[in-house]
Image (spheres, helix red, strand yellow):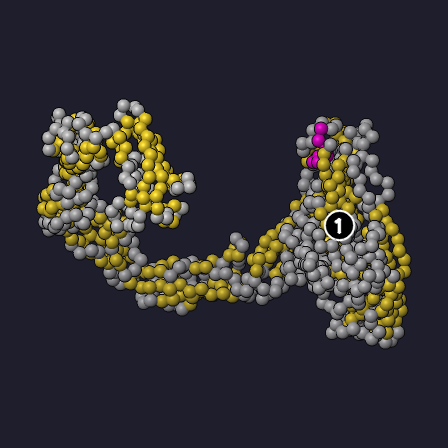
Amino acid sequence: MKRSTLLLLLILFYGLSSKASHIIGGEMSYKYISGTTTTVTYQVTLKLYRVCETADNLAELPNAVYFAVFNKANNLAVNGSPYLISQTSKATQSSGQADPCIVNPPKICFQIGTYTGNITVPINAAGYTVSFQTCCRDFTMENIKDTHRANDEEHFPGNGATYFTELPGTNDILTNSSPTFNKDEAILVCANKKFSYDFSATDPDGDSLVYVFCAAYGGGQVTNGRDKYATPPAAVAPPYPDLTYVNPYSGAAPLGAGAYVVSNSGLITGTAPDPGKYVVTVCAYEYRNGKLLGIHRKDFHMIVTTCVRLVEASMPDKYDDCTGFAITFLNNSTEGKTYDWDFGDGTTYTTQSTAPFQHTYAAEGVYNVTLWVDKTSNCGDKATAVVRVYPKLTPDMRIAGLCSNTTTTFTSTSTTTSATDAIATYRWDFGDTGSSADTSRSPVANYKYPGAGTYTVILDITTTNGCARSDTSIITVYEKPPVSTTPDTLLCIRNSLGLTATSESGGQVINGTYAWTPDYNITNANTATPTVFPKVDTGYTVTFTDATGCQNKATVKIDVRDTLYVRTIADSTVCTGDTLHIRAFADGNYPLTWYEIPSNTHAGDGAILEIVPPAPSASYQVIATLGDCSGHDDMSLKIVDPPIAQASKDTTICYGDQVTLTATGGAYYQWTPTFSLSTPNQATTIAKPRDTTLFIVTVTDTKGCPKAVRDTVLINVVPPVPAFAGNDTIAILNEPFTLHASGGTRYVWTPADGLDNPGIDSPTTTINHDITYTLTAYTAEGCSGTDDIKLRFIAGPDIYVPTGFSPNGDGQNDIFRPLPVGITELEFFRVFDRWGKLMYSTTEYLQGWDGNYDGKPAAIGTYVWVVQGKNVNGETVIRKGTVTLIR
């Protein structure tokens, strides 16, 4: 199955309070009844449309309405207005039996309320407006802007609706009656394909009608109270505001670009828009003998919703462009079916494809084409089309006069080659969106545009046999004809110059005459292409006059030159191998040419010469030319080599050392970075970098080449040597102790007392008294660093613990800690108060208690400690005791 869209030509207006309008569309018309020498009586009829649903919060059709009557001359209410008009009749319309081949057919039902009353008004020239207003439209409409406020519907209820009719005055025809639209029926159409709905009207006087989409009107006030049948407040005086449409919709295209109303029949046709609710208004323009008598309107809402149809036949409903005997047929039907065509000329065609194809008719005529889809199925469908074969109809137009100050003439040059057909009707739309009278039905028409601008002109033609085609032209209307001329220019006093003027609009040449002034040294002054030869500066003005008498002017200023002045750079010294951009300066926009001297070789063109001059010297000349006038300037270049910079070699130094940097090759030197240099602007300088640095020297000389040349020296600085002899420690008395050095590649220990080898990283000492050893560590580059280690020898292995400490911050005996001798692992050290509360605990070597507990000083007194560790023999050593804390 193929999804399509269901189009319901009615309105559904749900969820409104009884204060909001129930009206979902309307039409107001009038009929002439009688007249006297001073008054005239008309029967005025209002039709209102409402959905069939009944709910507490959904208003009913009112029992009565107000007809408000206003004098069109001043929009003031007439005596007796508003008139209370009771409901005349009430009817219900529905779609009847739903199509069984639509899977989800919707319920279609709406009510029609009719209100008819006689209105007698004094005869005047302008006539009268009879109006009815109601609030409020459905605020979920797709094509208009929602103006309601959900939190303040009392003051901002949203868009309303205005329906009115205009009674004629003596300026028109007092006995005229307005047209009325023919149908009030509910229909449903599966959209996204062509649909048609007859929206035609009938005029009781036989006047001709032209149909267009137009903007719906807003307005209306909230109905107070909870009465579901309440009469809406009377309408206010005109003018009435248009609703604001949402792009891409408008009053002229309320269903988008896919749907339109046929101007001469009132048939709404095309493709339905996306699902949603839409406001649609049709205006019927009433003409009698070419005079517009009035505009009759009908406003209704259209709902587009989704439906599923088992099989659908669809194709264009007519082929009436009459362009040849071969007609290309389009099949928009449900895919994957069997399609049977009857072309109306005795031939048929069966296919399983929906691809476009051609059928050629043998003779002119009108043919009725039928397409069946699944012809033998109960849910098969068919579509019909009318084909008019009267070749060849060619719409064309000729447009003359594009000046807004005069009248533009439009001539139809359309043709048909058919021997049995002829062009019968013409309709011009001149594209003036600010006027509703910008149309004509004459083959030759005139229209005066309100001002300059771009307008889209459309010519619709139909033939006697019903062929219809259109031609469109976009024109540019001007207040003055556009004129373009030769631009302002320079001229050699010894030469002449041909001038040119043209006038074009929208790519079309405008015919007219040209006249040039002043009459000074000019030939062919009354043509578009004169020749001038002034001897002084002169401005020549051309006056262009188009065929309608509109004029415009343009001026060409001619600057006459006798002598040309051009200058380039002064003689200079430049560097060998450099690309030079040499600029020339002239007193006018002349062509410039460069030559090498003395060979007179062409070197370049334009204001800038780009060259690499050859050593040791070169000369150039620039020449400015303007016809038979010229000027020149020369310059010479001396080419010298740039300096050759050479700096010291890269080297390595130890941290804290200095190095001498030298450079040669020029007269001036500049070293960077400068922060570690003694004399950075000298050829020789002392550098004391603290880390690896790339020094750059910039060398210049005094030989004439200003180019700076650079060289670099990389000084690699060995970082400070991290010599480490180990932490100060306590060793076991009369036991050998091994030292451990790090930070270098070679080591020396001093003094050598007690050491088995002072030149290695891990010597062993057998000394038995306290001593300090000094370690000197060397890198591979020969840089060195030193470190000390203090050794204290105590009998052991054992753990020594003091008996007291004073954590008062004087730097003496502030920490209570054990002194392990020959202990390889401290398993724990703990301190308790006399009640057994743990005050401190650690497993770190040489760490101790600072006399604080929980961030506060502990009380003075005696505390219990216990310490345990492993000695060098792997034996467990445990000691216990007390310590006194004093402050």
Residue 330 magenta: yes
The percent coordinates of residue 211 (x first, y second) are 75, 55
**Main secondary-structure element of the magenta-colored stretch:** loop
Q: Residue at x 58, y 56 (%)?
A: 475
User: Could you tell whether 266 is left or right of 769 in the image?
Assistant: right
Q: Residue at x 80, y 59 (%)?
A: 18
Examine the image and state in which quarter residue 535 appears: bottom left
Q: Would you place residue 459 above or below residue 782 in this image?
A: below
User: Could you tell whether 229 is left or right of 455 in the image?
Assistant: right
Residue 244 in view, yes or no: yes
The percent coordinates of residue 762 (x first, y second) are 18, 27
Toward the viewer: 632 or 774?
A: 774
Residue 813 magenta: no
Residue 265 in view, yes or no: no
Toward the viewer: 228 or 345?
A: 228
Toward the viewer: 197 or 116?
A: 116
Q: Which residue is mark 1?
A: 302
- Residue type at tag 1: Met
Q: Residue at x 78, y 29 (%)?
A: 374
Magenta region, residue range? 329-336
User: Could you tell whether 219 is left or right of 544 in the image?
Assistant: right
Q: Residues within 10 Å of mark 1 (few under 14, many from 20)?
A: many
Examine the image and state in which quarter residue 818 appears: top left
Toward the viewer: 514 or 731?
A: 731
The percent coordinates of residue 27 (x first, y second) are 80, 58
Specify the farthest residue to the top: 873
Location of the N terminus (image quadrant) = top right
The percent coordinates of residue 134 (x first, y second) are 78, 62
Q: Secondary structure at mark 1?
A: strand
Q: Residue at x 84, y 74 (%)?
A: 80
Report the label total: 1
